[in-house]
Image (cartoon, coloured by chain):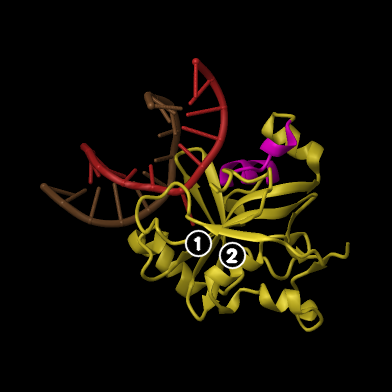
Chain colours: A yellow, B brown, C red
Amino acid sequence: MSIQPASDAAVTVRSRIIRATFFQRDPITCARDLIGAQLIWGKCAGKIVETEAYLERADEASHTFSRPSARAFISRNKPGVAYIYFSYGTHWMLNVLVKGKSNGFVLFRAVQPLQGIELMKKRRKIDNERQLCSGPGKLTQAFDITNRYHGMNLCVDPCHCFAYDNDDVDVVADARIGITRSAHHLWRFTVRGSEFVSRRVKL
DNA sequence: TTCGTGATAGAG
DNA sequence: TCTATCACGAAG
């Protein structure tokens, strides 16, 4: 398996990387294409198995619907930048900014641990690999992602980036989790049959 | 199913 | 200031 950071240099080489960059596209396409890619964060890495798309406009579940600060973040920052916020008093949520055909965020909900697994187990204080990153709050705890990375560009630093391999991934779309407004959109994407997602897709 | 938790925004 | 809300997770 070859691993390449989503740097500008790599973009010119691999079509897979071009499809998954965060500018001139939209959050739904990006969320779908990031399934199967790797999230690399320091000594840890995992295969992304679950994402959700949130749009800046016409999406009542998005932060931008009720938070001026989220709208300001979009106008201030470049695509590919991390948008990290604190939720329910205990959990950090990792998003990446997408700007282009439409603006918004991709929320990372679950990854399959690949590297740094012992470190993740230590941080999470559990041993079950399937439970290490099977939720947006679990993922950030396992990867030690907090607001100190808020605003970081995830397309330049090889230690904090996305990487792509040659695997063909079977992606399923279904409804987003944990929201009440705009809940009918099929903007949650998972690897079909994966045991590492936060909640299995209803068949 | 319940509940702790804290940032945010809007109302007063 | 006060209060409602929230893209969650763990315990039971």
Residue C5, placed above or below residue A51: above
* Image position, residue A104 (x, y; %): 48, 68
Q: Is residue A140 left or right of residue C3?
A: right
Q: Which label sits in the foreground, 2 or 1?
A: 1
Using the numbered discs, state the Cα–Cα distance from disc 2 to disc 1 in whole angstroms. Answer: 8 Å
Check disc 1 and report its element: helix, strand or loop: loop
* Tag 2 and tag 1, C-beta contact below 8 Å: yes
Q: Residue at x 47, y 45 (%)?
A: A87
Which residue, as the protein is rendered here, is positioned at the far front?
A203
Residue that carries the numbered disc 2 in the rendered image: A31
Residue A33, placed above or below residue A101: above
Residue A170, placed above or below residue A75: above
Check disc 2 and report its element: helix, strand or loop: helix
Residue that carries the numbered disc 1 in the rendered image: A187
Q: Which residues are magenta?
A: A128-143
Q: Is residue A71 visible?
A: yes
Q: Amino acid at mark 2?
A: Ala
Q: Chain of mark 2?
A: A
